[in-house]
Image: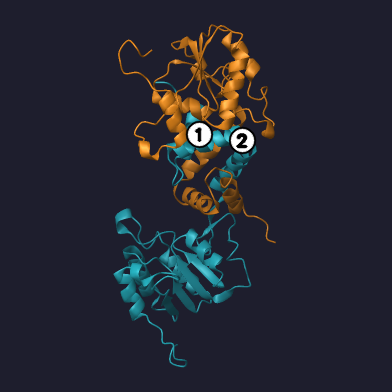
Chain colours: A cyan, B orange
Amino acid sequence: MKSQTLMDQVVEAFTCLPGVGPKSAQRMMLYLLERDREGGRRLAEVLARAMSDVGNCSRCRNLSETEICELCSDASRDPAVLCVVENPADVLAIEHSGGYRGYYFVLMGTLSPIDGRGPEEIGVDHLVNRCGDGVREVILAVSSTVEGEATAHYIAEALAPQDLSLSRIAQGIPLGGELEYVDGVTLTHAIEGRKSLQRGVSE
Amino acid sequence: MKSQTLMDQVVEAFTCLPGVGPKSAQRMMLYLLERDREGGRRLAEVLARAMSDVGNCSRCRNLSETEICELCSDASRDPAVLCVVENPADVLAIEHSGGYRGYYFVLMGTLSPIDGRGPEEIGVDHLVNRCGDGVREVILAVSSTVEGEATAHYIAEALAPQDLSLSRIAQGIPLGGELEYVDGVTLTHAIEGRKSLQRGVSE
């Protein structure tokens, strides 16, 4: 067996990225070596720093390079509303939508006993404490999967003793979704969760 | 304007890779931070080393971390045959096919006056010298594009004074290619380059 060259090692290292197989990894390496060494150097540098410096925000558990993350440090947000999400990508998606101005709490996963993730791993105690801090409304924005539903249920139970308004984000047909192609369970939820169009009747 | 966080910088750095947009870049960063810090550290480390250590082989011009690359150092190859290719990916593709046992010469591009790539940039002088070194056959395995054809023509002219057998890799229908879907120019080349099936008649 030949020893692995540095270039083989780069290809192998690139394949650890999601969606990157050996072919794409080779293409990435050759591209950087042939055309963008500066970009490659920069990627290596910021990546190394991020891997060692990024931790979790002590307030919302989101990924952060500071003790308290940028969102939690933003005093212009509404301290009464807390949105509970599964992972950092969800925070980015909600922030990108621009329709929410409260704070977040990131579970970093869902309850999944089979993978060894219990209430402690998703920080339920931490969330209960966080809710004591002036929060009046908690929005459970977890995925509509079996694990997500179980997690939402568990959290709802854990927060029951506190005097909080608790809600779950709406399930229904997505914007632009054609009824014909929407699955049956989603349709059932959409019909159950129908909203009246008469003024004064809808909440 | 807010200053860019380290995580924003990582996302931006990832987008320098071919085929990676802001969404994939974000996914890659979150994946590494949440699930594979060790892989991220390793990628950063080998990438940094490759960007500074990988140069070009002084014999074949291919990317190499050593003065003479691995292929050029392999004494078991046939020194009489030299295959001229456009870029390092072509060498890997031919090596992968397993059907070639000679040496290589990598142009690192094609002639393209509009992009400022003349004979010097693609190392034609270097190739002419290299051919003096015991080479008896040169296979021009450049792409079948306008630039590739021009490059092949130029190299053939430059090598004409030397007593070499010069060939161009065959053009025709690819294995598994259905005639119906093959373009007209390729078909014309395939018919012109037809090979006799009678024994003794074909070369």
In the picture shown, does residue B32 fall above or below B137? Answer: below
In the picture shown, does residue B115 fall above or below B139? Answer: below
Relative image position of residue B188 (x, y in whole percent): 45, 30
On the image, numbered disc 1 is attached to which residue? A10
Residue in view at x 46 percent, y 44 percent: A17
Answer whether residue A170 is visible to the viewer in this image.
yes
In this rendered view, identify the residue nearer to me: B186 or B47: B186
Q: Quadrant of the C terminus of chain A?
A: bottom left
Relative image position of residue B31 (x, y in whole percent): 47, 50
Residue in view at x 45 percent, y 74 percent: A139
Residue in view at x 63 percent, y 24 percent: B122
In this rendered view, identify the residue nearer to me: B85 or A40: B85
In the picture shown, does residue A55 fall above or below A14? Answer: below
Residue in view at x 51 percent, y 8 percent: B136
Query: Are dots 1 and 2 in contact, CB under 8 Å?
Result: no
Crowd rating for badge 1 (residues with CA inside 10 Å; few <14, some 14–19, many 20+): many
Quarter of the image for residue A128 reads bottom left
Q: Amino acid at mark 2?
A: Arg
Give the letter of the chain under mark 2: A
Answer whether residue B55 is visible to the viewer in this image.
no
On the image, numbered disc 2 is attached to which residue? A35
Q: CA distance from mark 1 to mark 2?
A: 16 Å
Q: Amino acid at mark 1?
A: Val
At mark 1, the secondary structure is: helix
Residue B119 is labelled as none
In this rendered view, identify the residue nearer to me: A69 or B180: B180
Q: Quadrant of the N terminus of chain A?
A: top left
